[in-house]
Image (cartoon, helix red, strand yellow):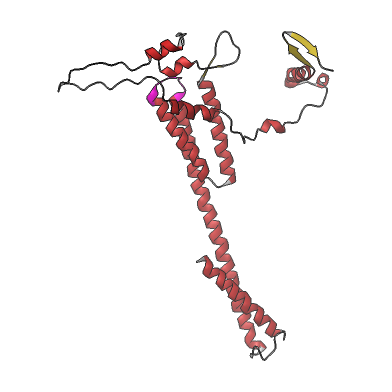
Amino acid sequence: MNTLVKILIAIAIGTMATAIGNLFGLIPECIIEQSKMITLPAIAISSGVLIASITYLRDKDSQASDRQRKSDEIYLNLARDSFDEVYDLLKDRNNDRIIWVRAARLLLQTLALKNDIKTPDITKAYLLVEEQLRTELYSALSVKTENHSNRQPLPPQFFYGIETWETEESLDEAAKIGSNKVEAHRVVIDKNLPEPELRPLSPESVIAIYNFLKFPEDYDDPLLNVDDWEDDWQDSHGIEQGAKRFVAHKKNCYVVDGTLHKKG
């Protein structure tokens, strides 16, 4: 259809140009033998065809853009709901193999939706939702300890799927506890055989989730565009006083082995 419209536009432009040239006597009569009065309808018809064709193409592009936006909005809403579900699956800091596999699969499928979103502002909204999940999972998959002020990563014992991951010090023992136990059961019609227990988390699910926790290499950090404070901290008032004193102090000193050194 677009090709036909383009052909019509080309014909209309050619016809209109020829008619205008004939009207003003720019084309020899030997080439076109028609009166200038006959030329006027040709100009009107050609102009109408040209305007209609351009309007059609414009409306078609607008409709395509609207369809793409609606499609992208569906993808964004689906991504938001899926990211929420991934967080809900892992927010209690469980080490259930099945739950981690489900969360990892859902996460990877949701990340793939980004490639189908073409509208720029919806892409930005998607990236914000993605970053929100990254922040939430960082808190869920790290621990606060008495000996450290910052949150600490989960210990390796956690990933063997054992209940005593917080107290078990030996990784070898954690592997033994989390290993599959061979049990014999008599087959009877009255009850089902128990499913084998798989405790250690799937390495693929762990890798998928922790790869997501790392910021992408092409991450555009908005903090890099923050303007530094140039005014004197002594002129600060209100809620920013402590913050300005900290920034000024931090820029003018550093600590090595517990000893404070002044810059400059």
Residue 52 in which image quadrant:
bottom right
Q: Is residue 264 above or below residue 42?
A: above
Residue 186 position within the rendered picture, expressed as x and y whole percent measured from the top left: 18, 18
Residue 79 position within the rendered picture, expressed as x and y whole percent measured from the top left: 48, 37
Instruction: Point out the residue furthest to the front here.
Output: 172
Q: Between residues 263 and 233, which one lies in front from this camera angle?
A: 263
Q: Residue at x 54, y 53 (%)?
A: 65
Q: Is residue 189 above or below residue 64?
A: above
The total of numbered circles placed on residues is: 0
Residue bounds of the magenta highlight = 90-98
Q: Between residues 210 and 46, which one lies in front from this camera angle?
A: 210
Q: Can residue 249 be seen in the rendering of this structure?
A: yes
Q: Is residue 116 left or right of residue 44?
A: left
Q: Is residue 138 above or below residue 77?
A: above
Magenta-colored segment: predominant secondary structure: loop
Q: Is residue 148 magenta?
A: no
Residue 15 position within the rendered picture, expressed as x and y whole percent measured from the top left: 62, 79
Q: Is residue 100 left or right of residue 132?
A: left
Q: Is residue 7 left or right of residue 160?
A: right
Q: Residue at x 28, y 16 (%)?
A: 182
Q: Residue at x 59, y 30 (%)?
A: 215
Q: Is residue 95 magenta?
A: yes
Q: Between residues 174 and 96, which one lies in front from this camera angle?
A: 174
Q: Residue at x 46, y 25 (%)?
A: 206
Residue 243 in which image quadrant:
top right
Residue 158 position within the rendered picture, expressed as x and y whole percent measured from the top left: 45, 16
